[in-house]
Image (cartoon, grey):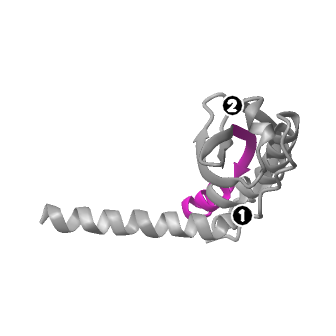
């Protein structure tokens, strides 16, 4: 076997485009929400999705969805929904590493953009700056893989 035959394909990762796919702000109780003492209860939900783009091989879209629901005095103060997305060239990775690139590495790149957009939108809505805490996407992705493995094992047991 020649050295060229067992040569691994070169790994390549490149950001093609980072953009806001969808964004919204709802402030249902204005102007009353601004007359109360600001002691919010904030709930944050994160989700990531990835898909291969048909237009060209090795192109993937990754979407980081973040929902921020702030309640003040048990009343909805604001709701921010954001889909921060990116198109990435990813090639030369095995299936497991590709999953990591899509489920952890790319969301890590998108998060600072999402964090800035959410903070800016909260301020534009008349609220104090909202800075999201850093997120460990590596741990979230590992947890997702663990849950998928447990689910698959449970389905195999019920099939027998």
Residue drawn at (77%, 64%), measured in percent from left and top? 134
Q: Closer to us: mark 1 or mark 2?
A: 2
Q: Secondary structure at mark 2?
A: loop
Q: Is residue 154 magenta?
A: no
In percent of width and height, residue 112 lies at: 83, 53
Whether residue 148 can be seen here: yes
Q: Which residue is mark 2?
A: 29
Against 97, residue 25 (above or below) is above
Q: Which residue is mark 1?
A: 135
Residue drawn at (81%, 50%), measured in percent from left and top? 115
Task: Verify CB contact (< 8 Å) between mark 1 and mark 2.
Answer: no
Residue 88: quarter of image: top right
Question: For this view, does 31 lie left or right of residue 83?
Answer: right
The answer to which of marks 1 and 2 sits earlier in the sequence is: 2
Question: For this view, does 159 lie left or right of residue 119?
Answer: left
User: Which class describes the residues within 10 Å of circle 1: few (<14), some (14-19), or many (20+)?
Assistant: few
Q: Is residue 98 magenta?
A: yes
* Quarter of the rendering occupied by the N terminus: bottom right
Whether residue 23 can be seen here: no
In percent of width and height, residue 105 lies at: 72, 59
Distance from disc 1 to disc 2, alpha carbons, whole Å, reads: 30 Å
Question: For this view, does 149 lie left or right of residue 121?
Answer: left
Magenta span of residues: 81-102
Residue 86: quarter of image: top right
User: Which class describes the residues within 10 Å of circle 2: few (<14), some (14-19), or many (20+)?
Assistant: few
* Quarter of the rendering occupied by the C terminus: bottom left
Residue drawn at (84%, 46%), measured in percent from left and top? 119
Residue drawn at (29%, 69%), measured in percent from left and top? 153
Instruction: Name the residue nearer the viewer: 31 or 21.
Output: 31
């Amino acid at each position: 076997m020649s050295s060229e035959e067992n040569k691994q394909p070169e790994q390549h990762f490149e950001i093609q485009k980072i953009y806001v796919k969808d964004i919204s702000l709802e402030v249902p109780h204005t102007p009353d929400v601004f007359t109360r003492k600001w002691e919010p209860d904030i709930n944050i939900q994160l989700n990531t999705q990835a898909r291969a783009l048909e237009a060209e091989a090795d192109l993937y879209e990754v979407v980081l969805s973040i929902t921020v629901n702030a309640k003040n005095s048990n009343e909805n103060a604001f709701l921010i929904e954001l889909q921060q997305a990116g198109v990435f060239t990813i090639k030369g990775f095995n299936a497991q590493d590709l999953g990591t690139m899509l489920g952890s590495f790319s969301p890590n790149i998108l998060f600072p953009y999402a964090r800035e957009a959410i903070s800016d939108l909260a301020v534009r809505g008349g609220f104090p700056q909202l800075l999201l805490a850093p997120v460990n996407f590596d741990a979230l992705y590992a947890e997702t893989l663990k849950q998928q493995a447990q689910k698959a094992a449970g389905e195999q047991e019920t099939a027998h």
